Image (tube, helix red, strand yellow):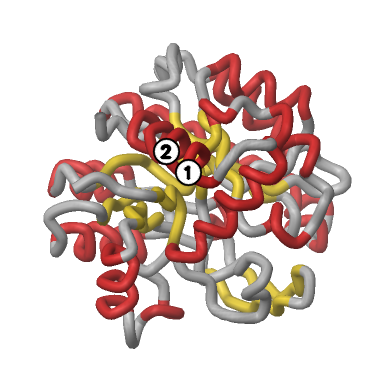
Amino acid sequence: MKPILFDTHTHFNFNAFRGDWEETINRTLKKGVWFVNVGAEAKTSRRAVDIAKKYPEGVYAAVGLHPIHTYDDIFEEEVKGEKVKFKTKAEEFNGEHLVGLIESSEKVVAVGEIGLDYFHIKKFPSKLNKKLKAKQAEVFAAQIKLAAKCDKPIIIHCRPSKDYDAYREILEILKDVNSYGCKNVKNCGIVHCFQANAEILEEFLRMGFHVGYNGVITFTDQYNELVKVTPLERIVLETDSPWLAPVPLRGKRNESIYVEYVAGRIAELKGTDFDNVAKITTENAMKALDLI
């Protein structure tokens, strides 16, 4: 069986699906949607792998240490009416643990989500702020090297702040870490929830990355032009569920089956039909994750 749509970024391995993840996954696969459960730290990475092992096809895992899990914090914010609140506990990067997860199953298709997140650390005093930034960069670089060693693509998380251009810093780190042989679209990876500009977009495309768009593009026009200038052959779909449910499902728990609304919006912005977007973005996802 081949997928109809491919959600390259979801979190059925998170607590939001603790009570019904099996039912949700079965419903998702029945609709012809394949997906990657993306880890954020050791626990959710392990859970992503364990879940993927239960299914013969269509369910994959990514493992990694998210930048916001490199320090202790309480996150509380509102995104277009959607309230998000959770707590993180600092976790030391453990390369051996991640390599063990990767080697435990061929269903592990990427290292991620990894990167830089400067949006929240602006609230900390300047000295601590710099320390947290440096820690994120250190862990990101280490995971890029680990991905290269294991011959896996990476899934990049990036969230800049008003004062810090995290996208530009990620590009610089990628260029500095020469051991990551990002030479073509098959061994690079995905820039998750892309929200930068056309100049940054071009640099990621030149390096060989695919770009992920999710429900955000359905409830704001801010990224219309960015989607239009992104080659369809380099776009992958994602939900980032349980968050960022697309229009017309704002306020509900997001799921991978709702990725169809993202595909529909891209078709609208690109002036093409849904089936074409579904076909090409699914092929892109399979290529980016080395599944074909």
Q: Position of residue 203 (x, y in %)?
A: 66, 19
With 227 as the anchor, is 65 left or right in this view?
Answer: left
Neighbor class of circle 1 (other Cα within 10 Å; few <14, some 14-19, many 20+) is some
With 14 as the anchor, is 159 left or right in this view?
Answer: right
Seen in the picture, residue 22 relative to 60 is either above or below; the reply is below
Q: Which residue is mark 1?
A: 275
- Tell me the quadrant of the picture where the C terminus can be found: top left
Amino acid at the residue labelled 1 = Asp
Q: Which residue is farthest bottom?
A: 19
Tell me how far mark 1 sits from mark 2, CA to CA: 6 Å
* Residue drawn at point x = 49 percent, y = 37 percent: 276
Amino acid at the residue labelled 2 = Lys
Q: Position of residue 291 (x, y in %)?
A: 26, 34
Seen in the picture, residue 63 relative to 46 is either above or below; the reply is above
Q: Mark 1 and 2 residues: CB-CB less than 8 Å, in contact?
A: yes
With 85 as the anchor, is 283 left or right in this view?
Answer: left
Q: Is residue 74 visible?
A: no
* Residue drawn at point x = 25 percent, y = 53 percent: 58
Nearest to the observer: residue 83 or residue 165:
83
Circle 1 SS class: helix
Q: Which residue is mark 2?
A: 279
Q: Position of residue 147 (x, y in %)?
A: 35, 32
With 261 as the anchor, is 248 left or right in this view?
Answer: right
Circle 2 SS class: helix
Q: Nearer the viewer, mark 1 or mark 2?
A: 1
* Residue drawn at point x = 43 percent, y = 54 percent: 92
